[in-house]
Amino acid sequence: MSAIFNFQSLLTVILLLICTCAYIRALAPSVLDKNKTGLLGIFWKCARIGERKSPYVAICCIVMAFSILFVQ
């Protein structure tokens, strides 16, 4: 089943996107900062969410990892 139609897979993809964008922005800020608008602005927004809400994102990642490893 595709990640679009499975809610848990969709949440996993979104969490991975947020974490990856925040990591890339920490390593090379100029890559994401030059595209703040438009379609590529989604990655900048995900990086901002990852930076500002990092404790909540970390908790969500831990809960998601637990549910993938032990519940399924």
Image (cartoon, helix red, strand yellow):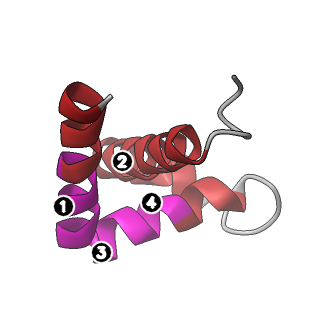
Residue at figure coordinates x 44%, y 60% from the top left: 47
Helix, strand or loop for disc 3:
loop
| Residue at 23% over, 67% down | 54
Amino acid found under the numbered disc labelled 4? Ala
Circle on res. 59: 1
Mark in the foreground, 1 or 2 = 1
Q: Gap in Å between the C-alphas at discs 1 and 3?
A: 10 Å
Displayed quadrant of residue 56: bottom left
Q: Is residue 6 magenta?
A: no
Q: From mark 1 to mark 2, how far is it between C-alphas?
A: 12 Å
CA distance separating discs 4 and 2: 7 Å
Residue 47's label in the rendered image is: 4
Q: Report the amino acid beneath label 1.
A: Ile
x and y percentages locating residue 16 in the rendered image: 42, 41
Residue where numbered disc 3 is placed: 53
Q: Earlier in the sequence, mark 2 or mark 3?
A: 2
**Which of these two is toward me, 44 or 57?**
57
User: Residue type at mark 2?
Assistant: Cys
Mark 4 or 2, nearer chain start: 2
